[in-house]
Every structure is written in C-alpha cells, then in structure tokens.
Image (spheres, coloured by chain):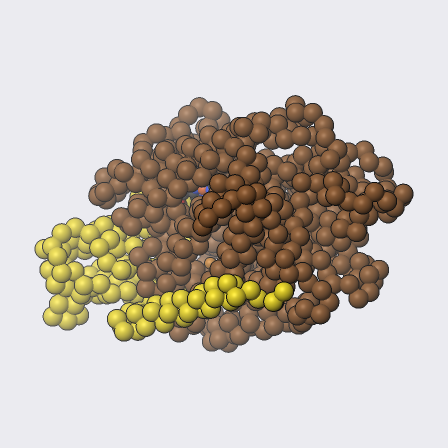
Amino acid sequence: MEMIHRYERFFLGSTVVILIIGMVAVTSSFFVNDLELPSPVDTVDPATFTSEPPFNNPGLFQVGENEYDAIITAQAWAFIPGQITVPVGSTVNFKIGSVDVVHGLIVHGTNVNLTIVPGQISEATATFDEPGEFLFVCSEYCGILHHNMAGRVIVN
Amino acid sequence: MTIAADAPKSRPAHPIYDMEGMEHSAAVEMEDSRLVVFPRSQTRPILWNVILALVAFMLGGLPGIGQALERVGINLYNNDVVTSVLDENAAYYQGLTLHGVLLVIVFTFTFANGFVTLATMRAYGRPMASTLLVQLAFFLALAGTVLAGWTMLANEATVLFTFYPPLEANTMFYIGAVLLVISTWVTLVNIIITHRRWAADNPGKRTPLMAFMAIMTYAMWAMASVGIAAEVLFVILPWKFGWTEGVDAQLARTLFWLTGHPIVYFWLLPAYISWYTMIPKQAGGRLFSDPIARFVFILFLLLSAPVGFHHQFTESGIPQWMKNIHGIATFAIFFPSMITAFSVISALENGGRNAGGKGLFGWIWKLPWGNPALTAQLHAMLIFTLGGASGLINASQTVNLVVHNTAFIVGHFHMTIGAVALAYIGIAYWLVPYLTGNNLWGRKLALWQTWLWFFGMLIFARGQISAGLQGVPRRTAFADSVYRDFIDGLDVPNMLTAIGGSMMGLSGLLIFIVIVGTLMGLAGKNREQLIPVAETRVGATKRIWPWLDNYKVWVIVAILLILIAYIPFIVTYVPDGSSATGAPFPLY
Ligand code: HEM
Ligand SMILES: [Cu+2]
Ligand SMILES: [Cu+2]
C-alpha cells in the first residue's frame, strides 16, 4: 500500500496552497494598508508616574492643525481624562500609561485596541471623520470595578 | 467492539502482570492476545484523577451560567446562596476566576494526567514503571487544587486564571498553580521511565502509536510550561516574598504567553490521542495512517510554542516585527490540523461504509450515533472546526485589533476548549466504566447531554461573537457596567448568550447525573469493558519513516525553535528599570 494515499496527497497539497495564500494575504494586507501594531514607545517608572512627564499632566493637547495628543492615565478604575472633545476630522494620538495594574483601551468606532502594561507607554492613532460620541472602555480586568472604567470621545 | 471477541483461543495461561487479580475490569488484551491486568494501585489514582477532573468541571461550570445569564439582566450574584459562598462585591470576578482556573487548569490537567497515563499503559501493555509517581501526580494536583481553590473562595485570589502581575493574589494561589504544573511533570517522568523500561524489554520494536503520542504531548507541554514556571518562580514569588520591590509586568506577561499558547495544545492533544487511536475503533473503522499520525504530533511539538506573541499584539513592549514573525508562524499549525481533519474524517467514513453506508454522505448516518462516547466526540469535532476557524481570525494581525479582548474571544475559545471539554466528557463515558467496571448508566441522558451542549455551544458562541464585534470587552460584569446602555445592537447577542449558556448549563447537570449514576453502579457491573484501540490501514513497521521516532532530535529542534522565536526579545528587551507594585488599595 502506498505510504501517502493520493487523496491524502491531494488534500495536503491543497492545504499547503491555501495556507500560503492565507499567509501572503494577511501579511500583505497588513503592509499594503500601512497598518501598525502597538510598538515600543518609551518606558515610564510607576514609582514616579504621576510626577514626571508626560503623565504629570494628562489631557488633550493640540499638536497640529487637525491633530491632537490625548495623554491619558489609566488607573483603577478610571481614565484620566474620561472625556475628550475634538472637532470632526481630527486625528487623535492616544498616549496612555498605567499607574497601577494592567488595563486596556478599546475605542469604539476605531481600531484602537491597546493593552496598557505598567512600565510601558502605549500609543495608537485614530481619525474621527464622523460626528458623534465614541465610547472607550477598559478591556483588561483590573479589579472589581473594572466594568466602570470607561470614557468617551466627543466629536463635533 | 471487544478485542477479546476475535482473539485466538490459546492465550497464555498466566497474565504477565496479574498483581492483585482481576478485581475489576481494568485489564486489557493486547494485539498479540496477551492478557494484561493493571494493578489497582495505579488504576485507582487514575480514576481519582478523572473524578477530580469531573468535580472541577461541575464546580467550574456553575459560575459560567451566572456569567451568561448576567447578560440579560438575570443577576444570580446577589442571591443568598451565592453570597454565602462568594464575596458579595467581588462575586462576578471571583466566580470568573473559579471558572477559568477550575476548567482550564484543574479539569484539563487532571483529566490529561489520568487519561494519558492509562493510554501509555495500554499502548505498552504494562503498568507504569512507578506506582509512586502515579499516586504522587494525583496528590500534587489535589493539593494544588485545594490551595488555589481555598484562596479563590476566600476572595484572596480574584485575579482571573491569567493572574497578570502586579495584580496580586495570596501566595498560596501561586503555589497551588505550581503544584498543578508539577503534577504534569511528574506524569511525564513516569511516562519516560516506562518507555525506557519497555524499550529495554522489547529491543527492535517500534514505540506503539498511542505511547508515541503520549510522549509527544507531555514533552511539548514540559518545554512550554517553563515560561509560566519562570514567571512564578523568578518574577512573582520573589516579589511576594519581598525580595524584589515589584515586578516587571511586561516580562511577566511575555513569560506567561510563552506557556499560554502551547497550553491550548496540551488541552487538545489528549483529545487528539482519542480521535486518532480510539475513535476509529469506536466508529467501526481503521486509522488512515500510523506514520502520518506520528508526523502530526511532531509538528505540534515543534509549532506550538514559538508563537506566543500572537497574544500580545496589543502590547507596546514588543516590537512590531517580532509580532509579525510570531503572527505568520502561527498559521503553520493549520497544516497538522488539516492532516488531522483528513485522518479523522477518513477513519469515520471507513467506519460508516463498513456499516453499509453508501454514497457521498450516506456513511455519516451509519455511524454509531447511539453511543454517547462517540457522539460527544463527533460533536466536539464539529464545534472545534468552527473554533479553529475563528482562531485564524484572531491570529490575523490586522483583525486582531478588532477582536482582541472583546467577547469575540470568549466565543472563539468556548468553541475550542469547550469542544475539547466535550471530547473529554465523551472519553469519560467509556473511561469511567472501564476504570470502575460499572456499566454506563443513563445512556439516553448522555445522548441528550451531548446534543444540548452542541447546540447550546453554537448559540452561546454566536452570541458572544456578535457582542464582541459590537465592542463589548471580555472579563466584564456587563450588566453592572456604566456603559451597558450605550452599546447598540446587543439585545439579540445577549439573548443568544443567555439561551446557549443555559443549554450548556443543563447539559452539565446531565453529565453530573450520568456520572454519579455510573459511579454508583446503577446499571450494573460488566467485566468486559475495554479500552478502544484502532487498527491502522498503513501501520508503522520498523522500515517506514524510522526517523519519526527520534524523540531527542525533535525535542532539540523544538527547543531551538523556541529560542529562535524568543531570542530577539530576550536580547533587546530592556527591563523597564521600574518595578510595578500595583495599586495602593485592594482591587478586589
Ligand atoms: C455552562 C457552560 C459555560 C458557560 C455558560 C460559560 C460562560 C462563560 C462566559 C459568559 C464567559 C465570559 C465571561 C467574561 O468574559 O466576563 C466565560 C469565560 C470563560 N470560560 Fe466559560 N462557560 C461555560 C463552560 C466553559 C468550559 C467547559 C470551559 C473550559 C473547559 C470554559 C472556559 C472559560 C474560560 C477559560 C473563560 C475565560 C475566563 C477569563 O477571561 O478569565 N467555559 N465563560
Ligand atoms: Cu482597567
Ligand atoms: Cu494562542
């Protein structure tokens, strides 16, 4: 009896082809669309977190014509600031760090999805082209009031 | 069904390993019609493992029902009975921690230790080399369960099963987790010694397939578990003991996920042992090819671990290019998964045709659907296929940003581990009878059970997937949240989650009834209970692909792959120089 039956060979061959197509598609879609995953920005010492820049002064800062830096502190159980307001068409760079345990940030209506690890500064960018209210929530368990850790971006 | 039925009459007068006589049915008749009786001193601890696993399954499942009903505003957490057990403020997350730890650590580890040990004994046709280690593995797991369970119930470890520092738990919680991991290492050591002894007694013979798979499964896990062991021993415990001021949270997570991805294959491979080497027999067919099955397990050994960053796409401590590499490498697991699909389905088809099934799909209806041990595992395969497909979605780096840490993931992994759990239950439907000598009681109930889980799971997972796509985060007491009314389109998903979850809960109740009835012997005794072992279409004689059996080489290659995958991080990661210590007040 042949070692690998021809049906099996056909099946496995197709699997390899599908696999390669899938890998190429996923990888190229990533680079073609110029997408980014969160990458190292800078570190921040939790011990001096609240006394040193940037998190000694969280808030929204205009850095370009339509561009803002949102410096956000994540702590149990709130984002500071919990609400930011920007005009339609703004690009917002979220820069966020945690003062205590691991938190997360998911901004609805965008691809912003960060895990905020203490010691690391996390960064992601989104453009808000539609007016409205966009919820952002903590997406990593951080204690019993984790479900109350949320905020919103108001675009008008 | 039984091997005994077609065995030659002239079997050796004296079984080789008749230590305490055939007190119950834990005997096997080997392919060469040798009769082997396993000592009770080993089959009992195996049974205890299975019972501990099932108890963990039952207790761990209960909070799941609360979590699912919470979505539609049915709050079980302020019920008097619940608050007499759980802390009234922390109840949701305390329950969720119990759910995670009991189901994916205790249930899976103890079931694997018991089942894979027995598979090893059956494959070699001899008891384990060390009875002491069989017992030790059980008692370590029991002690670990008691320690972790006690801290969780005392609300001193409401940190979820991932226990990311600097979220802090009682030291005993970590010790408990370590003991559970050590129980698996002890099992591996015993498997290896048994293999050595067998090889010394059987020069020139090829390792039986089932034993080969047992070795590969445990070798893969032993390597992978080094990450979590290092995290606990070198990061968390020194901090707990006050030797270091805090933890490097990013490093801890990276170590955690070095183990956290391959652990899913440690859950899965025991089910695959059943699907490759037992299910064909139960379906009345033969395994397609023994050497290819070995090849698949080697691929799992090699490909499981070097991909952990795909759980860390959203963390900024790891450079993007490293994540890209792990992300792409993740897809390679598709290959052995598809070989498995081919092998398992062809064995099933073979069984269905042997039973008279005709046409392209006619064989499906001829499978023994009346056997709950088989039906549960067929359902598990179907659900798992969807779970695997949704895994491809998660692994796609771009889409990951849409689904990461949302309820979508909950939908995904209930279709993977929830399917594996169903497969374990299916195995238990013959394993408990085998180990006790009692017939399975409540066969009809068991069939209801598996159909309920099957449909319940599909409904539940669909609900969670849709909720996740609307942006609902996972690990969240949703009904209590400040934003529950600010997310649109959740009515139907929440309803599906609750209905499907209830069906699974009901299914769990039926498992409890069937297993208790079986343990009590309500359906009487039967000494003919046997371990199903499949024959193969292409067997593995000494000549076919002998390189497959070079364990040492494969383990070395696997270690090299892990090093290649992690060395860029290890050499470039600058510890953040800080020590995260958590919050100045208790978080639960
Ligand atoms: C009655 C059946 C079950 C129901 C209704 C159920 C329901 C749920 C729900 C709703 C969640 C999400 C909770 C949240 O993210 O806030 C969850 C989480 C989870 N479930 Fe289940 N589940 C069931 C059975 C199982 C089984 C059998 C397993 C594995 C063997 C399992 C493993 C998990 C794990 C690992 C989590 C994640 C825990 C975490 O995020 O820390 N579940 N379950
Ligand atoms: Cu948080
Ligand atoms: Cu993974």
The residue at the point 77 percent across, 34 percent down is B24
Residue nearest the observer in this picture, B135 or A50: B135
In the figure, what tint was chain A given?
A: yellow
Left/right of residue B151 with respect to residue B468 in the rendered view: right
The picture quadrant where one finds residue B316 is bottom left
Against B232, residue B362 (above or below) is: above
Kindly identify the residue that appears in the image at 36 percent across and 30 percent down: B75
Q: Nearer the viewer, residue B550 or B485?
A: B550
Q: Is residue B463 above or below residue A32?
A: above
Chain coloured brown: which letter? B
Q: What percent of the width, then of the height, locates residue B18?
A: 86, 42
**In this orientation, which residue lies closer to the viewer: B278 or B18?**
B278
In this view, the residue farthest toward the right is B13
Counting from the top left corner in percent of width and height, residue B566 is at 51, 71
> Where's the C terminus of chain B, which quadrant?
top left
Residue that appears at 74% across and 43% down: B6
Any part of residue B236 in sight: no
Can residue B490 be seen here? The reply is: yes
- Residue beneath the point at 34% across and 47% down: B465
Q: Could you say where residue B410 lies in the image, as x and y percent from the top left? A: 40, 47
Q: Nearer the viewer, residue A103 or B112?
A: B112
Q: Quadrant of the N terminus of chain B?
A: top right
